[in-house]
Image (cartoon, rainbow, N blue to C red):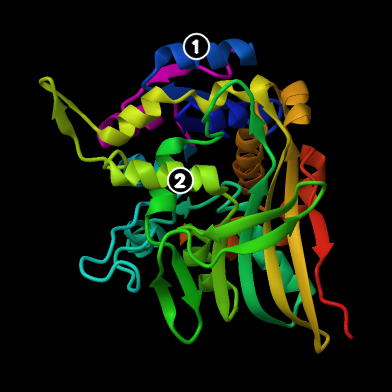
Amino acid sequence: MKVLLIGVGGVGEALAIVAKDRPWLEKMVLADYNVARTEEVQGKLADPAKFPIERIDASDKNAVVALAKKHGADLVMNAVDPIFNEAIFDAAFEAGVTYMDMAMTLSKRHPTDPYHLSHVKLGDYQFERSAAWEEKGLLALVGMGVEPGLSDVFAAYAAKHLFDEIEEIGVRDGANLEVRGYRFAPNFSIWTTIEECLNPPVIFEKDRGWFTTEPFSEPEVFEFPEGIGPIECVNVEHEEVLLIPRRVDAKRVTFKYGLGDEFINVLKVLELLNLDKTEKVKVKGVEVSPRDVVVACLPDPAHLGDRMFGKTSAGTWVKGKSGGQPREVYLYQVADNEHCMQRYGVQAVVWQTAVNPVIAMELLASGAWKGAGVLGPEAFDPDPFVELMPKMDFPMGTKEMTPKAG
C-alpha cells in the first residue's frame, strides 16, 4: 500500500512510526507545510526511500490531487486539523483513492437555538456525498482515530458479543497525565480541543434524534481503570455521537471528556476574549486568526513527551441487558506515557490515536475490511480489529461495572 500522509504533527509522526515495519506498507509520503518538521520525522524513521517528504498546503485540493497522483497513492491519510477536511476529502475523491481521517468535517451552530437544536452536524458534508463515493466504488473511512475510531469499534464489539439490548453507549475519556515545566500545556491539538469543547455538545436519543446542549453540561464522576481513578467528565461535541447510532441500536449515545476545572476555565476565558475565533482580524496591518495565535503561543504537543507523566484511557461504556440481566461494561485502552516514550519515542496521546488508523490500513490491505461510500468504523466487523490490537502492543481492557444486586 502506498499512503499519502497529509500532516506530520504529533499524530502523523506516531502513525508513521507505528506503520513503518508493517509488511503491507510500500511507501508513506510525509507531506506537511512545515518542511523542517517532515525532515525531522524522516530522520527519525531513517528510511528516506520508504518515507519521502513533500511540502503541501492542505487547503489546496488541486495540490493534494497532484501529490496523490505523483506518488501513485492508494490511500490519502488526513492527519491535520479538521478545518482542512473538505479539501482533502474532495481531493481523494477526485484522485480516485481511498480516504481516511480521524476527525470529520466541522459542524455549524444553529443560528437561533444553538444549545437545543443541531444544525450542520459533524460529518454532514461527508455523508451527504456518500452516494457519489459509493457509485465510484471508493471508500471514505471517516473518524478512524482513537475517539472517534477505537471507541466506535468497541461499541460495535459490545453490540455483537456482550449485549442483547443496549440502553446507552457513552464514550468516556480521562487521564492523569501531567506536563511538567509548563503552567498550561495541552497534550493534543489545542485548535481541535477548542473546536470540540466550546461547540454545543451533541447527544443522541432514539426517540428524539440528535440535539444539542450547553458546553460542559451533565457533569458526572467516572472511575477510570488502571490507577487513573475517578475524574469528573462533561459533555463535549464529538463524532461518535453522530456515527455510532447509524449502525448500532442504542437508546442513547453520549461523549464525555475529563477536562478538569483548570482546562475548562482556560477555555471559557479564551471564548470570553474571542480568542477561540477562526475568522481573521487585522493586527498592525497583518491579518491573523485569534485561534491560530493561541496555538502558536502554546508548546507543540508533539514535543512534550519527555515532560509528560501518567496514563490516558480511551473507552466506551455500555449499559444494557445480557441474557435478560442488567449489565454495564467499560471497554478501554490505556496508554502509559513512559512506555510510549521508551518504546516508540512519542507521547501517549498521539501514539494511542495513531495506532488505530494503522490497524485499519492493515485490515483494508488484507481485505478483512472492505466497502464503498462514506463509512465510520462501526460499519465494519469489529473482530479483526480487536484481534490485531494485542499484536500491535495495544491491548483492550474490559471493566465490568454492573451494580451488584441488593
Q: Position of residue 198 (x, y in %)?
A: 39, 52
Residue 45 in the figure: left or right of residue 224: left
Residue drawn where x is 51% and y is 30% of the image: 184
- The residue identified by callout 1 is 39
On screen, residue 39 above or below 238: above
**Residue placed furthest toward the bottom:** 324
Which of 24 and 46 lies nearest the eye of the viewer?
46
The amino acid marked with disc number 1 is: Glu
Q: Position of residue 349 (x, y in %)?
A: 63, 37
Q: Which residue is mark 2?
A: 265
User: SS class of the residue under badge 1?
Assistant: helix
Q: Say which quadrant the N terminus sits in.
A: top right
Count residues near mark 1 (Cα–Cα under 10 Å), then give few for <14, some for 14-19, many for 20+: some
**N-terminal label among 2 and 1:** 1
Which segment did they paint magenta?
A: 48-74
- Assess whether residue 55 is covered by the magenta stretch: yes
